[in-house]
Image (tube, helix red, strand yellow):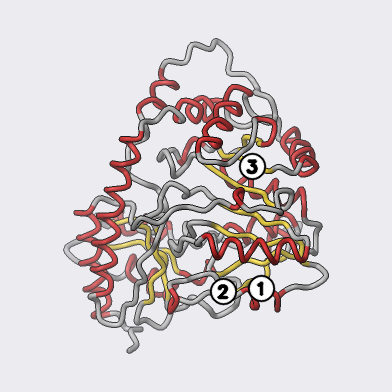
Amino acid sequence: MPKISEKGLAMPASPIRKLVPYAEEAKKKGRKVYHLNIGQPDIKTPEVALEAVRNLKEDVIAYSHSAGNESYRKKLSDKYREININVDHTELLITTGGSEAISFALMSTVNPGEEVICPEPFYANYNGFSIAAGVKVVPVTSSIDSGFALPPIEEFEKKLSPATKGIIICNPNNPTGYLYSETEMKQLAVIVKKHDLYLFSDEVYREFCYDGKHHFSAMYLKGVEDNVIMMDSVSKRYSMCGARVGAMVTKNREVLDTALKFAQARLSPPSFGQIAGEAALDTSDAYFREVYDEYIERRNFMVDALNQMPGVKCPLPGGAFYTTVHLPVDDTDEFAKWILSKFEFRNQTVMMAPASGFYSTPGLGKQEVRIAYVLKKEELKNAMEVLTEALKVYPGRIA
């Protein structure tokens, strides 16, 4: 039998999706599974986006420009300027989800064998995108004890090597929900400028900032305009994960021209997704206020419920809709399988994402899980009851 490629063997399975067979088996047994493992909001997609697709009059679903529909790029750049991200439509590419924006950014700037530094835990697919591009992720570890704040800049300095090409961050962070402050972002700008690195900034959760805090975009940083590449997406902002439309944004013309060659190779981003994405830019402020209030209520309930469980530690996330939680168990990979396959409470169980898949350093995250508070409060209440009862009887529980 022919052999699988080394790159294919190195590609990690998704920690978010790898437990799907266990969840499917639980459902076959008639159990209700609460999906806290994946960032799939149950918030309704804005009606303006749905109507744009429903009322489409096109007779042919044609290729768009490889950079995306010009009308969408112009409207999106107008929206960015409203929040002081001063770009025009020639300084962004529409991509197939934020995922492709990340891949294009890495492939356009980092050679195989070179390195990017990333605070861990980090969005698990950064590992996959990097392996596909031949790039090595070098982790700088953040701690639950500080709420997963940005590690000291000195720790980044220690990780620098002649192979270092950039730093990648997610702000607000997936999987921790930590919101990087203006001060932290400016600290990153110093090291980026000093060592002439790229700063890849994943800002797909920009609207989800809580407790009076505000998002400080990497695009606001002064003196490093050509170093910054922002990745964006409609998936979470408009609850349109299946639209698969994102954007890569930068003032660096050479990077854009290079990324466009990769964009041409895949022909064009999704037509229906672009139509929905362009229409979604007209979403009312009332929609976002309602979504904000809903997530605040969910977050506060869930964090309180988790911290009331003996041995559980959950920081208060400042953004996004995730939190990374310490559980009093020996191995959350095994616990996540066990709770789906061998436990039920009132014919219910819970699916979570073991945090080991969000770390690059071997052995870390074995007592942590990522939980997404994307379900209605009543369902979160039931899920927290299931988790409470499961922790009482799990054979691998530790103090």
Residue assigned mark 3 = 248
Residue 162 placement (x, y as % from top left): 83, 70
Query: Which residue is depicted at the point 42% across and 74% down?
Result: 368
Image quadrant for the C terminus? bottom left
Which labelled disc corresponds to residue 151? 2
Say which of 43 and 201 sits in front.
Answer: 201
Instruction: Say few, some or many: other residues with alpha carbon within 10 Å of mark 1 (under 14 / 14 to 19 / 20 or more).
Output: many
Please name the residue that numbered disc 1 is placed on: 156
Residue 234 at what x, y percent from top left? Answer: 49, 39
Residue drawn at x 63%, y 45% as measured from the top left: 101
Q: Where does the image place residue 317, in percent across and percent down from the top left?
A: 38, 63
Whole-angstrom CA distance, mark 2 to mark 1, is 8 Å
Side of 209 relative to 173 (left or right): left
Q: Residue 27 carries which label?
A: none
Q: Is mark 2 on a helix, strand or loop?
A: loop
Which residue is at the front of the view, 97 or 161?
Answer: 161
**What kind of residue is marked 1?**
Phe
For this view, does 4 lie left or right of residue 51? right
